[in-house]
């Protein structure tokens, strides 16, 4: 694994941990597991930026539609992605 791939993996893991920590401190959410789908963007003016393409979240409080909406809005704001790229499921 080269340095750029390792760096991308580290960034993704860091983002997942930070999102998990934030969400677990929101009232009603409870325990959370987060998985991000990322893609490294290359371009003339940008090199190696990590873009979040999709988010999967399992949350204890996901049976409450208000909690699901709070989680979805937070993820949309943080990663600037559309609602259909976010899946929130009830944790068993």
Image: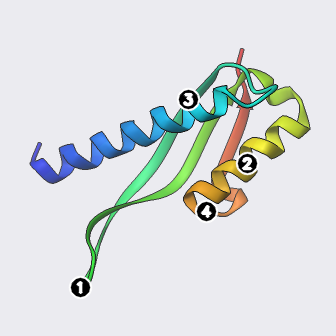
- Which residue is tagged 3? 21
- Which residue is tagged 1? 44
CB within 8 Å, label 2 to label 3: no
Mark toward the viewer: 2 or 3 = 3
Which residue corresponds to the image point at 59% horizontal and 64% vertical from the top-left? 80
Which residue corresponds to the image point at 72% horizontal and 20% vertical from the top-left? 30
**Screen quadrant of the C terminus:** top right
* Sequence-first disc among 1 and 3: 3
Cα separation, mark 2 vs mark 4, equals 10 Å
The part of the image, by quadrant, that contains residue 76 is bottom right
The part of the image, by quadrant, that contains residue 71 is top right
Which residue corresponds to the image point at 56% horizontal and 58% vertical from the top-left? 79
Mark toward the viewer: 1 or 3 = 3
Residue 84 vs residue 33, the one in the foreground: 33
* Sequence-first disc among 2 and 4: 2
* Total tally of numbered discs in the picture: 4
Cα separation, mark 2 vs mark 3, equals 15 Å
- Which residue is tagged 2? 72
* Sequence-first disc among 3 and 4: 3
SS at mark 4?
loop
Left or right, 92 with reference to 4 = right
CB within 8 Å, label 1 to label 2: no
Query: How crowded is the residue under tag 3: few (<14 C-alpha within 10 Å), some, or many (20+)?
Result: some
Mark toward the viewer: 3 or 4 = 3
Image vertical order of residue 33 relative to residue 76, above or below: above
SS at mark 3?
helix
Image spot of residue 69 (x, y percent) = 82, 45
Which residue corresponds to the image point at 11% horizontal and 42% vertical from the top-left? 1
SS at mark 1?
loop
- Which residue is tagged 4? 81
């Amino acid at each position: 694994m080269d340095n750029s791939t390792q760096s991308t993996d580290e960034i993704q893991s860091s983002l997942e941990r930070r999102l998990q920590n934030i969400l677990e401190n929101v009232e009603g959410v409870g325990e959370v597991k987060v998985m991000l789908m990322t893609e490294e963007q290359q371009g003339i003016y940008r090199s190696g930026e990590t873009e979040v393409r999709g988010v999967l979240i399992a949350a204890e409080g996901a049976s409450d539609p208000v909690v699901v909406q709070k989680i979805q809005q937070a993820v949309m704001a943080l990663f600037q992605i559309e609602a259909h790229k976010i899946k929130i499921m009830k944790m068993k």
